[in-house]
Amino acid sequence: MMLGLLLARAGVDVTVLEKHSDFLRDFRGDTVHPSTLEVMHELGLLESFLQRPHDKAHDIRAFVGGAQAIVADFSRLRTRCRFIAMVPQWEFLDFLRCEASLHPGFRLAMNTQAVGLIEEDGRVVGVRARTPTGETAVRADLVIGADGRQSAVREAAGLQVVNLGTPIDVLWMRIIKRRSDPAGSAGRIGTGRFMAMIDRGTYWQCAYVIHKGGNEAIRARGLEAFRADITALVPLFADRIKAELADWDDVKLLSVSVDRLVKWWKPGLLCIGDAAHAMSPIGGVGINLAVQDAVAAANVLAAPLADAKLTADTLTRLLAKVQKRRMWPTRLTQAVQVAAQNRMLDPLLDGTRPPEMPFALKLLNRWPALRTWPAYAVGVGARPEHVNSPEAVPRRKA
Ligand SMILES: Cc1cc2nc3c(=O)[nH]c(=O)nc-3n(C[C@H](O)[C@H](O)[C@H](O)COP(=O)(O)OP(=O)(O)OC[C@H]3O[C@@H](n4cnc5c(N)ncnc54)[C@H](O)[C@@H]3O)c2cc1C
């Protein structure tokens, strides 16, 4: 959607295909980081975006047993917004849709599922798509696979995937927040357990980390035992856990995968976002990396695509340039995530004794200035992109 907006803004005719009839998917990650807010500012959209419902997370905390540490302090960043905006993903997508629709070249086809590629003379020249009224062909100079980590486009293209492996899965839950609860997002570390609690104002969005493939065993122990695990970690929840986790439908499994394509493109096709690199939930960076890819792709491609003289060979060279730009930040981010999963989370889940405050967290507690680094790593990340693609066509009135 972001790339659709950027290309339409530059005068390129864009059609975005979305297989669902709406954007209403829960637990998709709602963390809009300072890097993405910076992009919104560069597009002149920050103020209107922040009119949409959101909460602000100014820091990230960790609770180890009874002790507390501030891990990342976003107020120390030198970005325009020194917080993470917690925006429901459907609000974010709907906002981008509204803005993109103000550009005459933008078209969104809902209920339209890409099911295959159309290739001619060794080039991708469009997609086959399934709609409620039958199959249709959409031809294009360039197809962008931005269809997430189960990407049908990357599979149809036969692009090679490297799976980096992961020892964890995540169980997502929503637990009501009481007025008396302490505010702020935090990680809770207990004996053999870790849960991230994201403060959503009226509820806690909870990510309970388990061993890869451990979901069946947890369910086999029964819901009562699972509720006891959660309250052992967060005693605060004892008064509400039964009502909030009434049955297993209240607990959603995220099967974590960390992978990336060796080559993100082939002639006529480029993959970005999760389709090019599925991220671990660590740091909540997936949305923001996808947005960075979109900005980089538009910086490289928007002006040439708007130029009628662009040749297929030049376009292919530009696709390689997009990958070259984004591969390094992707590799680095995934390397940090994989190290955190393997060296911190996995051993922690095997723990049988109450954990002690890790040395690194003690340092962050002792010297607050050090909290800038994790805040930068999470909130801005490697190689932040800035909007350089042109605004070539005037927006229609809203
Ligand atoms: C449970 C969960 C929690 C997460 N939490 C966070 C978080 O806290 N913070 C964060 O930054 N990231 C989080 N993520 C990751 C984040 O959601 C993704 O990294 C990000 O959404 C990737 O954006 P994308 O546009 O590449 O793909 P997606 O957001 O997956 O978008 C792909 C879109 O393409 C559509 N689509 C799929 N296949 C087709 C098809 N064949 N034809 C047409 N349309 C199709 C899908 O319906 C979807 O709308 C989470 C992911 C999950 C699953």
Image: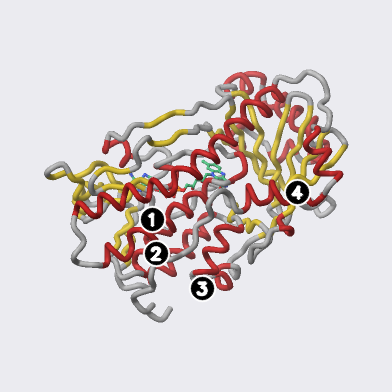
**Marks 3,1: beta carbons within 8 A:** no
* Rendered image: mark on residue 44: 3
Q: Identify the image quadrant of residue 141.
A: bottom left
Dot 4 corresponds to which residue?
371
Q: Earlier in the sequence, mark 2 or mark 4?
A: 2
Name the residue located 56 percent from the left edge and 69 percent from the top edge.
Answer: 46
Q: CA distance from mark 4 to mark 1?
A: 32 Å
**Residue at the spot of label 2:** 6
- Single out the mark in the foreground, 3 or 1: 1
Judge the density around disc 1: few (<14), some (14-19), many (≥20) Cα neighbours within 10 Å. Answer: many
**Distance of mark 3 from mark 1, alpha carbons?**
19 Å
Residue 195 percent coordinates (x, y):
70, 36
- Residue depth check, mark 4 versus mark 3: number of the one nearer the observer: 4
Numbered disc 2: secondary structure: helix
Give me the disc on residue 388.
none
CA–CA distance in space, label 2 to label 4? 34 Å
Counting residues from the start of the chain, the first of labels 2 and 3 encountered is 2
Callout 3 amino acid: Gly
